Amino acid sequence: MIPRYSRPEMTEIWSPETKFRIWFEIEAYAGEALAAEGVIPKEAIDKVWERAGNATFDVARIDEIEREVKHDVIAFLTHLAEIVGPEARFVHQGMTSSDVLDTCFNVQLVRAADLLLADLDALLAALKRRAFEHKFTPTIGRSHGIHAEPTTFGLKLAQAYAEFDRCRARLVAAREEVATCAISGAVGTFANISPTVEAYVAEKLGLKPEPVSTQVIPRDRHAAYFATLAVIASSVERLATEVRHLQRTEVLEAEEFFSEGQKGSSAMPHKRNPVLSENLTGLARMVRSYALPAMENVALWHERDISHSSVERMIGPDATVTLDFALARLTGVVDKLLIYPERMQANLDRLGGLVHSQRVLLALTQAGVSREDAYRLVQRNAMPVWQQGGDFKELLKADGEVTRALSPETIDSLFDLDHHLAHVDTIFARVFGPEAAAR
Amino acid sequence: MIPRYSRPEMTEIWSPETKFRIWFEIEAYAGEALAAEGVIPKEAIDKVWERAGNATFDVARIDEIEREVKHDVIAFLTHLAEIVGPEARFVHQGMTSSDVLDTCFNVQLVRAADLLLADLDALLAALKRRAFEHKFTPTIGRSHGIHAEPTTFGLKLAQAYAEFDRCRARLVAAREEVATCAISGAVGTFANISPTVEAYVAEKLGLKPEPVSTQVIPRDRHAAYFATLAVIASSVERLATEVRHLQRTEVLEAEEFFSEGQKGSSAMPHKRNPVLSENLTGLARMVRSYALPAMENVALWHERDISHSSVERMIGPDATVTLDFALARLTGVVDKLLIYPERMQANLDRLGGLVHSQRVLLALTQAGVSREDAYRLVQRNAMPVWQQGGDFKELLKADGEVTRALSPETIDSLFDLDHHLAHVDTIFARVFGPEAAAR
Amino acid sequence: MIPRYSRPEMTEIWSPETKFRIWFEIEAYAGEALAAEGVIPKEAIDKVWERAGNATFDVARIDEIEREVKHDVIAFLTHLAEIVGPEARFVHQGMTSSDVLDTCFNVQLVRAADLLLADLDALLAALKRRAFEHKFTPTIGRSHGIHAEPTTFGLKLAQAYAEFDRCRARLVAAREEVATCAISGAVGTFANISPTVEAYVAEKLGLKPEPVSTQVIPRDRHAAYFATLAVIASSVERLATEVRHLQRTEVLEAEEFFSEGQKGSSAMPHKRNPVLSENLTGLARMVRSYALPAMENVALWHERDISHSSVERMIGPDATVTLDFALARLTGVVDKLLIYPERMQANLDRLGGLVHSQRVLLALTQAGVSREDAYRLVQRNAMPVWQQGGDFKELLKADGEVTRALSPETIDSLFDLDHHLAHVDTIFARVFGPEAAAR
Amino acid sequence: MIPRYSRPEMTEIWSPETKFRIWFEIEAYAGEALAAEGVIPKEAIDKVWERAGNATFDVARIDEIEREVKHDVIAFLTHLAEIVGPEARFVHQGMTSSDVLDTCFNVQLVRAADLLLADLDALLAALKRRAFEHKFTPTIGRSHGIHAEPTTFGLKLAQAYAEFDRCRARLVAAREEVATCAISGAVGTFANISPTVEAYVAEKLGLKPEPVSTQVIPRDRHAAYFATLAVIASSVERLATEVRHLQRTEVLEAEEFFSEGQKGSSAMPHKRNPVLSENLTGLARMVRSYALPAMENVALWHERDISHSSVERMIGPDATVTLDFALARLTGVVDKLLIYPERMQANLDRLGGLVHSQRVLLALTQAGVSREDAYRLVQRNAMPVWQQGGDFKELLKADGEVTRALSPETIDSLFDLDHHLAHVDTIFARVFGPEAAAR
């Protein structure tokens, strides 16, 4: 996470101020529950809210205390006592540091997930808008980087929409995974605190109680969360890679928006490079890499060790901030993408009709030619066009063995582009829902 | 995937015989749908079923053809024609190889998921049985490898149960992700085949139609699948690590079952090593590593490239076979684990009562001592015990500053083990459900 | 490692037969050293060589014994005793299983490295041959997928040569890392065996003694080895990606060799796809992924645990066999690559001279125009060409502000392609050595 | 990279101020070489040094310009022109941004490597000092976490020394890999700049010219660099894991130094946790994970794309700063480690002499008992001790079948601890050199 690839709202979630505020709320809500149970005086927790409820915690002071006691939660509680006074001793009763740390981390991950879901919604909206805009814009479909058969640019975007819609569903599930709260004491037995406190705090923070914790909330939940971000990042890479390909000099079917004043190259003033999409490719690599230490964090020793902590201090912000930035950047790329239908048509025409070869093959087979013969007939007319250019359709019409099976009119009909667009509506209905697709 | 770490049922899913059988079914069901649409003669597809429906495909022959044509699906179709005769030319009409390959791969992954779900069920059953067996077996809970507070061995296993239960839920979702079928042609436009064929084949194979494919089924689905296996493997590693720790010479609270005739060491005949659990740790590393190439597979170029294929030929079997083996091995370890409650009690007693220090701290605070003073009082009595041994309780009783706040009887009550078991029922009810826990 | 992506010589290194043969040699050489020390009778070891020196070990029999004793080295020794008779009891004196296993693994890795070095030599030879063949074949250099400035196809290959030459140097170092032998007993103290035995066996096997082992040879050596293979795989991916780009329909500057009888697509007979290079991209992902578990293997517990073993049983063959196959395949791709200089020239001409813009920019600056003005002048003439086509040179000549600084003759000279080839000899001399480059 | 896990000297390398200073030096030295070639006026470059040689570049101002021109090098050059005046137009002549960016990145990586080498030297010094201190401190060697045979604590540290010494050698090689400079223009052809400029700048900066670059310096060099850091991190994890094990309550053979005022647990005041070593385990996971995107960066498209850039902006600082912090922390842990020889002895005695079982086995074999019988004899006396405690030596003496082969005196001699220390000097000489070991 570096400023260049950060947005403020997500960064804010990971600020010390936000963290200490969440810590305070956990402690204060736990205090309310403890007071309700009669464990601590109600007056004490009222004082805590009264004196610290709107306080801004002094991060520098807490850091100073931590340097001495070498324990972050104790440092915070000491500072809280400086604000609240003697009633602070009732805070954190029967709790252990991890109750605060783990619940706070989950609150932060849930909030981060909410921002990422909003990011995905914005991306989906942009993809949908552009998909409908180019629903019937013909373009060549490619496999292996080689022209295959016609498709539409809208279908390309519909595919991306469906993919990010799956990403959204996965993220909803991943958010659910980490939306738990643990206030269960040193080894999770509630030895010195009642499960009702956990239930109360969980509800106040919009979480569910962790069914069984062991001082810590189990890290398989977090591994699933970061793995989900990694898969989303891989989908970001896919769409970014598509844009990079489309903007190649030789293809140039689309371009990233190029703002006034922007310089593509210090040396080559004419260049307009897909730098945002290339950047997204790199950011995707980063988000993907964070899944690994998250998975290695699962196997904590016995009831817990603290090896996960340094990892999470880094990947918590790094993964969410970077993915937030990437999704927003990708949305901008899609939203403002310059799309060149004429160039798509020019590329479609490039192979002299070869892209219709499968239809010819099929028609031959249906006309009674064996699969092997049909393949041979198509290939012998296709190869010259592939190698030296020419018009595939005309060659076919001049091949007696072909015309014995197919009339010139039939051959003409096989080269009809509309044929390839016949099911666009069906696919759009599958992806965007019947009404949406009917627009 | 190597024989040593493979089980036959899972391996069978990935055999060439199974693969060709699935290919055949895809082609034959597609043929039925095509015949129903009137695209090909019903008699033709009847002949296909009649002549090849119970055929065993000759893997060596198909390989031989593939060496010539360098295309696996064409090789299979050629061999199919050798079996079926001229009617074979109606097979694969309007389809592309990926229709067969991708749908087949998903069928295999779904079947693999089903086996893994059964594995998880067996593991969950073993964990539940042993958890209830040791529901109230006291043992020391540890954080940082250091004694913390008492817990029960049943709670340790309940935690593992809850974790693998989450694994199960994730795997159900991952199975759903890959349970799709695509018969959509060269670039996914259904140019030469109707979407009804896809729907028909999907239903026959227990899959759903892929809403929008691009010759291939999008690989974010598979990335999510393999990432899920990786997270499950991380949980395997966690439980295996626990067993390894418990079997340490100095701890020895549990041991892997040691069969007659087994030799632990060629050099040291007394040794009984947790080799199964260590092995599981290594296998977990492998399954985890396979998630990465699966994620890198997502960003295929344009409508598709074939870089994913070599990866999937390897990780398809490798990840599922290895995880299947690991889960079965882990179930065996849990099922037959030798558990030593006396040793657990001996370890519990080891620290001279220090494990009750938090309760003392809490009692002091509640008796009006400030948090800082209470911490100081506890620490000054705890440290000598920690360093030279001794009886923490007696030291406390001899400390005037302590007894000013707590009576000897109160101090005694703070050392009561039952206190730590008070919420075991609650936690079991959360994990296993109220009735189960009530047993 | 699957047969499809395996070559026999590398696979052979990992066969049980080879492994048992190496085990035998370690035991037998150790026996010779022990006999020389007078620890065991010379006659005994003579008998061992006599009866088992040319024996083929019965893998099935050893497996059978292992199923009973659950220990592979003991199983082997038991089988050896079946062959050798009572003298076999002198074998393995004072040794521990890891002495045999780890030394054997290193022998296998060294042999694998030797094959991989030979692979690299073949690849380097192919690259060099093709580089010189196209030393002065002009082609457009691209950054961001966008045309930049001219280069030569030979320079592209020279870059690849230099990269794989670095790979070779790294592999030599990695081979050295694992070329060690340990015969040091249960915890590496030589408690029951003299260091002279280790020295003797090491020398016989072409290894160096491991300075300090702990039952096992430390796994940082192996991590460095597999990380090196992973970096080499990344370079394989780079060159494969280049070929994939060059073969794109719109670029088509080179193509993988297309053999007679090969079918590119079951549906589209004209297609010629860069499937070998795409396959290499996938294989590179696999080899890269194996580095991770190798690194996780380093942190064995105390003097050793056996978690590394399952990992190495898999990645030992998987990584080396896959990389061996990939390097050989890449060599074939380079060796037979169809290269199309005319198409390179056509692509070079595509941008109407824009690729010379930097030289114009520079000439303007040197003629006294400020950097900012020069950039502006170039960009205003470049942009129309970029957008609608046209001739950049003519536009410049018609721009009064430009011609005030540069004469038409000067402008012409800036569009000279030879200018870009002036340092090709220098670079070739750097990469291939002065004499080689002078050819 | 977060402040908590950062040290100032390494962080400074990655500051914008340092970066711009290096950029300036590259541009200024290139200017000197260009002036020497007569390409630009000597006076111009003199002015550049005069006016900007000691300037502090205004990072905020450069950022401001970059927001407009969206190009970092152009922003810097524009700011440089603000400082230098019109002569600035001679700067960057014939160069491309990557010439500056890539050479700068390598300068930073080289400086980072120098700090890391110093870190390793400090760690090696600490390891050596403690190794000699405990050269003959007996301790139990463990395999699989189970007691094996005696070793010494000095040998454990000697192993770590040898391992980090290998790390050092690898890092020297990795530093060499990235110590290159490229000033070769838009596609590496030196089209507008002479190779002599590159040679001059390289020498000034302590680098070597990159033999063949393609606008960028090839990223396999950087992949090798970051992979090397990842392997070093894995060795950090190994030693940290050892300390964590040694500090376990049940083992407690060593402890991290515990400073006055430090609180181990907010809830359990007696606890002294190996938190530094656990933290190192987590940091190792992070450094390891950064190797992956570095490897994915290798396959840039054609002559270059910019996907590597975002990755390197993150992992450049993240990996080096984190490893620097980790090595320094580990050095502190080793340097101040509390080592408890009495406890080591107590653990050694724990198994009633079983750790000598291999010697007994060996002695039996040498006395003519078959390997199988010897194993059986040892195991039948070892198992009761393992299970119920007792004295292995006395049991052996009471076993008639044993005493038929071995006299009581011989049995006594097999339990002599010194036997295991006989080769400590040899191993120390191998690791630390003959003179060092002789101390």
Image (cartoon, coloured by chain):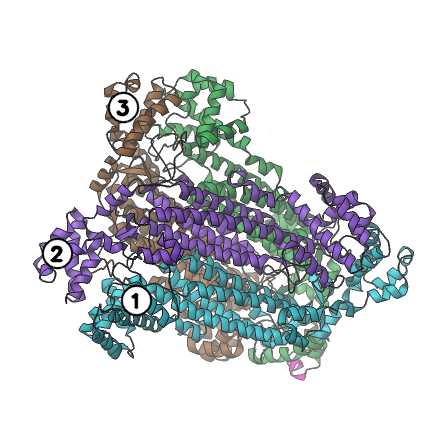
Chain colours: A purple, B cyan, C brown, D green
Q: Position of residue D77 (x, y in %)?
A: 45, 26
- Observer-nearest residue: D262 or D403? D262
Please name which of the two marks, 3 or 2, marks the residue nearer to the observer: 2
Residues at discs 1 and 2 both on one chain: no
Residue C309 position within the rendered picture, expressed as x and y whole percent measured from the top left: 51, 65
Q: Is residue C218 visible?
A: no
Residue B174 place in picture, x, y as percent? 47, 63
Amino acid at pointer 2: Glu
Instruction: Please name the residue that numbered disc 2 is placed on.
Output: A409
Residue at the image position 44 percent from the left and 32 percent from the top: D71
In the picture, the quarter occupied by the N terminus of chain A is top right
Disc 1 target residue: B197
**Discs 1 and 3 carry the same chain letter:** no
Q: Residues within 10 Å of mark 1 (few under 14, many from 20)?
A: many
Callout 1: residue from which chain? B
Query: In this view of the protein, which residue sits in the foreground, A119 or B378?
Result: A119
Please determine whether, in this image, residue B244 is positioned above or below residue A259: below
Badge 1 vs badge 2, beta-carbon distance below 8 Å: no
* Residue span colored magenta: D399-403
Q: Amino acid at mark 1?
A: Val
Residue under label 3: C396
Q: Is residue C326 left or right of residue C209?
A: left
Looking at the image, residue A233 sits to the left or right of residue C257; the answer is right
